Amino acid sequence: MCGIAGILRLTGVTSSTPPDVLDRLDAAIAYRGPDVRSRKVIDAGNCELDLLHRRLTILDAEGGGQPMHWPARGAHRLSVVFNGCIYNHRALRERFRGEYRSDHSDTESMLHAWAALGQNCLRELDGMFAMAMFDSESRELWMARDLAGEKPLYYMLAPGGAMLAFASTPGALWDFARSDAGRWQPGVDTEVLARWIWKGYDEQPPMRPIRSVPAGCVARARLIEGEIRVEVSRWAADVPERDNPVDLDAIDAALARSVSLRLDADVPTGCFLSGGIDSALVAGHASEQLRIRGRRLQTFTMRMVDTAYDESEAAAESACVLGTDHTTLDCPTTSPIDDLTGLIDQLALPLGDSSLLPTYWLARAAREHVTVALAGDAGDELFAGYRRHLANWLLAPAMDTLAALPIRRKTSASHPKSAVSMVARMLDASRHRGYDDILAIFPTATLAAVSPEAVRLLPPERVVADAPHLDFQEYLPGDLLRKTDTATMAVAMELRAPLLSPAIVRMGLGTPMASLLAWGRTKAPLRALAARRLPDSITRRPKSGFALPLPAWWRQDHLGLRTCLRDLLTSASPWGGVDLGIEVSIGECLRLVDEHVSGRGEHSQRLYLILVLALWSRRLGTVR
């Protein structure tokens, strides 16, 4: 787990990158890899590449340093900086034999695979990764991300194509672009920003000229007619058809193998355990495998102050059944504003997922015990674990009929996860953007009041027949994995998700919806597997999620949260002097605050997104 960055430039057209610029770029990714700092300049004749790497040491402390090169001796043809972990690295080492300088570095195993197969090796990797591979012979730079998008990678190409920069964080690139604004012409991408305000996430950052390499894709930068050009293509196989019968034993065996590979580390390793079945399945396999090795699995959960959002007792019950060494961590009492400001400062994106904070608090507390943690992420996206998946599957054919019903309602003040709220959201969505509006923090009708311009910039409406497929392709990498990467890397922790092994991804996305939602229950195959080792009190527990008691926090002005938002909105420059490019009504934002506080409406997530938008815009305007 690391931070990576680099600058590719045409020699004779642009001058060498000054050391102080590289220092600032390095400092922006330092928190992701506090153990080792390294750099390398590669001169390839008509182009030069600066590679920067910040390492969080997990495997092969002595031999796994980066940038790493192939061949190991003599003139280097390939050079790589890499963030993540290739879990099947030992099998790759056996398959792609040659001269290795390391004992068990996953980076070097991947490097040998690339030397043998080129970019085709990406389909052979079981891992999470963001890599930049440079071929000094062809003068090509390949920037690739893993299948699900667990690890982030951003790049930007200067107008005219004389320089390209890439980094693990968009903030590092934004600060670099701001330091040389004449070359990069940085600014807010209003069309992308509209999508962030709508849903609270998007694949692409709302800042020009920064782009994200999409999950499962590779961006190939090469010199053509005297300039750098970038072509993005998908290396991952297409999403499978839903025609595979459910094979519980095969899923269980794949999960056991995936967990085994993800327990490979030279540092203390544990598991995040919630009250749900996904993390319990992961922890169950991990506990069994470690017990064979004479060790006990360490598991961690966080006790939330509000009992309605607290899963600690349920997690403790699962830990007792699984026989883990369990620790319940206390939710911090410090101001959430300070922590949120720091996270948005590092992320440099207006991420609207409020579970970023408790995920960060859990990671920060667990980091005192372990450096690597396994988690149950992606079970819901792969195996249809959300109620909205069931609702969309049942009601999608009737959306037009629902939209025609003569129903009028006021903004619901119900709890956002209640059945009443879900029905209301479905009815609203049927009148506007369907499943996309179910996901939205600001559904179309509400967004129209806050920012009519944003509504006009939204993508065309679409019919979503397979909601889990869409969530895997968009919601998982754009929101959930970005959140967990941000929260864990902020404390230099590596998070591993066994359910995201390629084999399990194919099984989940290839299973018929009728099998995933059998008997009207979500993710039926995982529930059936959980029933083999867990009692009904766990497998039949209603889904809770890892969330903050935001509805009450806003009304109670918890630790000054509401006061902070009001102060930002009523200041002389609510958006920090940054031109968002689209009008966002301050008056309407304040109306939402008043309506929520009075109990006439439920806008807790919208208020959180408005707060994040204000913090993000101020971060954009800060010169570093």
Image (spheres, rainbow, N blue to C red):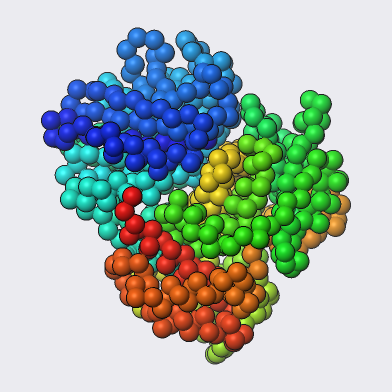
In this image, 29 relative to 439: left or right?
A: left
Q: Nearer the viewer, residue 379 or 66?
A: 66
In the figure, 559 relative to 589: above or below? above
* Residue in the picture at 43% in, 30% down: 37
List x then y, in percent, for residue 519. Answer: 75, 62
In this image, 417 relative to 86: left or right?
A: right
Q: Nearer the viewer, residue 337 or 239?
A: 337
Is residue 471 visible in this depiction of the protein? Answer: no
* Residue in the picture at 44% in, 54% down: 345
Is residue 535 visible in this depiction of the protein? Answer: yes
In the figure, 243 relative to 133: above or below? below
Q: Nearer the viewer, residue 505 or 441?
A: 441
* Residue in the picture at 81% in, 51% down: 316
In the figure, 71 relative to 414: above or below? above
List x then y, in percent, for residue 27. Answer: 40, 40
Q: Which image quadrant for residue 388?
A: bottom right
In the figure, 452 relative to 234: above or below? below
Counting the numbered discs, the total is: 0
* Residue in the picture at 50% in, 81% down: 592
List x then y, in percent, for residue 441. Answer: 51, 70
List x then y, in percent, for residue 242. Answer: 59, 50
Q: Nearer the viewer, residue 332 or 116?
A: 332
